[in-house]
Image (cartoon, grey):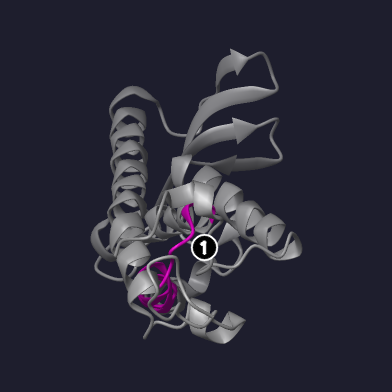
Amino acid sequence: MSAADGTAAPAPLDDESATSLDNPSVRARIRRVLPYTLLLAAGIILLDQGSKFWAEATLEPGVGVPVLGELIQWRLVYNPGAAFGIGGDYTWILTVVAALAVVGLAVFVTRLSSIRWAIAAGALFGGAISHLGDRLFREPGFAKGEIVDFIDYAGFFIGNVADIALVLGAIGIVVLSLAGVSPRRPEPRELGPSPE
């Protein structure tokens, strides 16, 4: 088949070639998407750590301050464990798991060319890095740090901004996966025309 100018038109790419990291078009889309992913992750880290600084400077540990009545309160607690305080005696193991998750997400986000996937993964990446920072640098010591939680959801769960980012990012990835959206094959309207 020939193009309008008489030259041979390139053969259409199959699905594997169209999403391969060897494809220059895919690499170009990744270069355009990655800064936004990293910017979102950095914003989540700053918001999470800033809100934790505010909570520690303002709130008395364990004392509830109503925000939406009993439904949402500020209540400062320190969590050595995972969700719901699980594994509090094994904080160093949680630190190792968090570090592995951050490394895995770092590799993953450098391979995304879909903006929707980048948003979901960026939220996960930012939340995971912020939690790892707590584990590494907060009291009682390196790799044994406690997570600062201060958003009390009706006494059922106390979390923070990073938790919100992690949950929303995970939901986003599940929805995108179920919808069949490829991490490396964005719809054309997401990024505009591919570079030459």
Which residue is painted at 69% across and 35% down in the image? 155
Residue closer to the observer: 163 or 111: 111
Q: Quadrant of residue 158?
A: top right
Residue 101 visible to the viewer? yes
Mark 1 closeness class: few <14, some 14–19, many ≥20 residues within 10 Å: many
Q: Which residues are magenta?
A: 100-116
Residue closer to the observer: 35 or 144: 35
Mark 1 is on which residue type? Gly
Answer above or below: position of 65 versus 166: above
Residue 44: x %, y % from top left: 37, 44
**Horizontal arrangement in the rendering, residue 173 relative to residue 21 (left or right):** right
Q: Quadrant of the N terminus?
A: bottom right
Which residue is painted at 50% across and 85% down in the image? 17
User: Magenta span: helix, strand or loop, mainly?
Assistant: helix
The residue labelled by disc 1 is 81
- Whether residue 40 appears in magenta in the rendering, the answer is no
Q: Quadrant of residue 143?
A: bottom left
Q: Secondary structure at mark 1?
A: loop
Answer above or below: position of 179 versus 51: below
Residue 139 visible to the viewer? no
Residue 35: x %, y % from top left: 27, 54
Answer above or below: position of 102 versus 12: above
Q: Quadrant of residue 174?
A: bottom right
**Horizontal arrangement in the rendering, residue 49 relative to residue 176 (left or right):** left
Which residue is painted at 37% across and 41% down in the image? 48
Which residue is painted at 55% across and 53% down in the image? 169
Residue 80: x %, y % from top left: 46, 60
